[in-house]
Amino acid sequence: MAWWARRGASRLIPLLLAGIAGLTGCASTPPPPPLVNPKTTTTTPRPVDTAEVIVGVDGVTGGYNPHTLADQSATTTALSDLMLPSVFRPAADGSPRLDRTLMVSAEVTSAEPYTVTYTIRREASWSDYAPIAAEDFVYLWQQMRSQPGVVDPAGYRLISDISSRDGGKTVVVTFSKPYPGWRSLFGNLLPAHLLKDAPGGWTSALAENFPATGGPFAIKQLDRDRGEITLERNDRWWDRPAALDRIVLRKSDAPGMVAALRSGDDQVALLRADGATDALLHQLAGVVQLDTVPRGDLVQLLLRPASPRLADARVRGAVAAALDRDSLIAAGTGNGPAARLRADAHVLPPSRPGYAPTMPSGGAPAHPDPATVDRLLTEAGYTRLAGAWMRDGRPLSLVIGAPADRPQLVDLAGQVQRQLTAAGIDAKVATPSPDQLYDTSLAGAAAASGAAPDGGVDIAVVPEPVGGDPATVLASQFGCPPPTPDGAKPLPGNPAGFCDPTIQPAIDGALTGRLPLPDALAAVEPVLWQQSVAIPLFQPADELAVRSEVSGPTAGAPFTGPFGNASVWQRAKH
């Protein structure tokens, strides 16, 4: 072999050995995997439906009749504003303003007899094409003057006749007495042609749904199990169509609504907030606009004279003196926005212009007064034995009623029970359905009329409507029932079961305009406090939260809420 060949071989051998060693090392330690470009994951945002607004609410369960005490709720008010026609609606300052989407005119046309003539737009009709006409006025009048558990019946009971002409589009209403509050009548008309002969009658009217609509929206779906009501634009609405295609009312608890507002799943929320929820809502500053919306009612304790156990004013006074009103207000409001709306008067709510406290400043019911409890119950013939107040071998035992579907009121009734028990007054809480409570337990005529059955509830923890005409509110809640003609069915009494002939002339005078309302209240309110008929606590209030992509929702006119102008709401892409 040539020298150069031997030299090349000597160099090649170490290289081959190094290569073999390298292959051996690779067998025990695999090389790193090749680099692969990772896949880029993209999330397609859900399209924004600018024709829909989702509103979080506390509840959607029925009934939905705005004229019954049992069905009063923020949702009932919302649905009524969206779907039922009204002759008058509140203006921004709360004064009644003719709704010209329904009416051509409404005016007093005669002083003797007092007569109001209404002219309805010819094109105004229900969603099944039936005209909105005189029969709807007649149906509402007939129910409101005679049914138990209705809202503000005093004005309807002054109507003596309703006639019509022009195919029912002109309605002539005659009153037995002058009635300055006539503009408060015939709000939220109902479709008489569907309801007057319906099974269950008035008690089932709007219990589950709305059979027809006469407003800018109609119900497409009402799902109680899911807690959702879907409303769509009413294509048979004769006036300017709503800007939105849909409004969805979706039930949730307060934390759920706050979370849905934060994420944008809800664009609006209307909820009854306690202090903790109010704090959560304020953490969304910059995301939502907040407004407080006072409701048109007062939470009150009705100490019912119609109850045999509370027929004695001294016993009612002792009950009032046993209660710690401040703690009841704190418990009922949860230190939320309603805590700023303490109600120290019976008729005018704190948010109404002209409100002024009428509650006596010292003693009960402003503050608990054990000495007064002892004095009044002793005067009424009771003796305290082993910590309990007894008479004729039986304890003073009271039933506190609260509607079963209002957990806040049920809890408040429990607070009342504990305070009375601590004072030696036996008490238990009953939670009937709202219909049972208002239509049966609280519907008996007042004890002073001599026709008061024992309905089983001595103290009622209820919201009493105060958003209407104040003189009508006064007469409806504290006035005596009108005299009953021979052979006629007695008219239901007021929920308080109260009638005092000494102040009835002042109540009648305010209702018919003979006496200015301030003068009537000056005569009536002291008597209500003195006789311990009712203990007003607070005016409930909701919080309205609106995300920035929705325009239109506001706190609304007094006592109506935000849905009165929902036909002009709009939603933009955020």
Image (cartoon, rainbow, N blue to C red):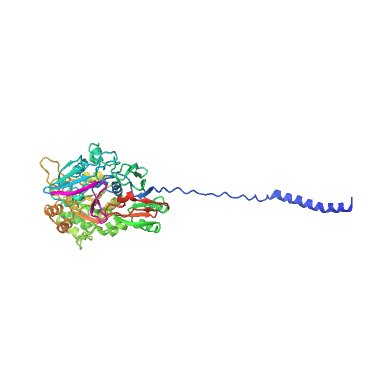
Where in the figure is residue 291, as x and y percent of width and height?
Answer: 33, 57
Name which residue lies at 57% across and 49% down. 39
Where in the figure is residue 241, as x and y percent of width and height?
Answer: 33, 46
Q: Is residue 480 left or right of residue 424?
A: left
* Residues in magenta, as a range: 88-110
Counting the numbered discs, the total is 0
Q: Is residue 491 left or right of residue 265?
A: left
Residue 366, quarter of the rendered image: bottom left
Is residue 135 a member of the stretch shown in magenta? no
Closest to the observer, 280 or 132? 132
Where in the figure is residue 570, as x and y percent of width and height?
Answer: 37, 51
Closest to the observer, 558 or 473? 558
Residue 393 visible here? no
Residue 97 visible here? yes
Where in the figure is residue 454, as x and y percent of width and height?
Answer: 18, 45
Furthest residue to the bottom? Answer: 362
Q: Say above or below: 146 vs 275.
A: above
Furthest residue to the left? Answer: 486
Name which residue lies at 89% across and 51% down. 2
Q: What main secondary structure does the magenta stretch of the protein show?
A: strand
Residue 235, quarter of the rendered image: top left
Is residue 93 a member of the stretch shown in magenta? yes
